[in-house]
Image (tube, helix red, strand yellow):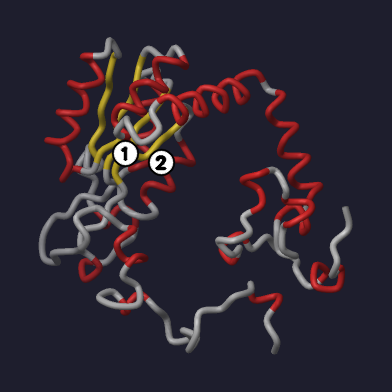
Amino acid sequence: MPSDNPQAESRYQDPGCAYCPPSVRACRQGESETRGPGFCPSKVDQNGIDSAYSLYDDPFTRRVAQESARVESEGYCRWTRVEEICQFAKKMGFRKIGIATCISFVDLANTLSGILESHGFEVASVACKHGGVAKENIDLDDIEKIRPGGHESMCNPVSQANLLNRAGCEFNVVLGLCVGHDSLFFKYSEGLVTTLVAKDRVLAHNPVGALQLADSYYSKVWGPEKPEKPAKLPADGRHK
């Protein structure tokens, strides 16, 4: 069904779901085509949505989507994320789970490994600093270390992924890897990956707190181009 304002729709080149008003969010009711704003993905790039949907024809991809939805439904507001990980892995029939942990989370990795083993899984775990490779080996200067003047081992997420791949892990759990290091782990892991803990050294590993308090205690997160009032439209739709 065509929009009442096709000119507004034509302004947008990219999806802008972050700006969808709480009173709309039509995708929840399957009404994106009729009620979605001009920056709705269904208005901006329906072909992209359609091509992505075709990927669910792959049996493994479809099964992951199905079992994820079943975990969401069965454990909704009842299961912790640890429980969801266990249940998802069981539904998928995974036997061996990997833990990619920050060296500072090894004690928690021990607890997680024990929990997974108690559910019948085999577990392999690799800490980020394994191998003790000096940061100089990736061309970092001494002054770029957290504590200059001595040996400082690099985080080694590519090797973490490689070791868990070689161990035959079908599903990997990230426990507190640094920003960027986690990205490399995702890139090189052959098994599916989920995150149990997202590292935030300031907010007790609760990074969403910076968003919830962005206009008060953590206003420092804003850059120099912070608007006086929150924008109601994506950049493409704002008056210049």
Task: Give the residue pinned by disc 2.
Answer: 185
Which secondary structure lies at badge 2? Answer: helix
Kindly identify the residue that appears in the image at 50 percent across and 85 percent down: 229
Viewer-side residue, 138 vs 203: 203
Task: Give the residue pinned by disc 1.
Answer: 196
Alpha-carbon distance for marks 1 and 2? 14 Å
In which quadrant of the rendered image does the C terminus lie? bottom right
Front: mark 1 or 2: 1
Any mark on residue 164, and which? none
On the image, the x and y values in percent for residue 108 come to 16, 36
* Amino acid found under the numbered disc labelled 1: Leu
Kindly identify the residue that appears in the image at 38 percent across and 28 percent down: 75
Which secondary structure lies at badge 1? Answer: strand
On the image, the x and y values in percent for residue 62 come to 62, 23
How crowded pointer 1 is (Cα within 10 Å; few <14, some 14-19, many 20+) is rated as some
Q: Quadrant of residue 180?
A: bottom left
How crowded pointer 2 is (Cα within 10 Å; few <14, some 14-19, many 20+) is rated as many
* Amino acid found under the numbered disc labelled 2: Phe
Sequence-first tag of 1 and 2: 2
Q: In this view, does 164 lie to the left or right of 30?
A: left
Kindly identify the residue that appears in the image at 59 percent across and 66 percent down: 19
Kindly identify the residue that appears in the image at 52 percent across and 28 percent down: 69
Q: In which quarter of the image is residue 18?
A: bottom right
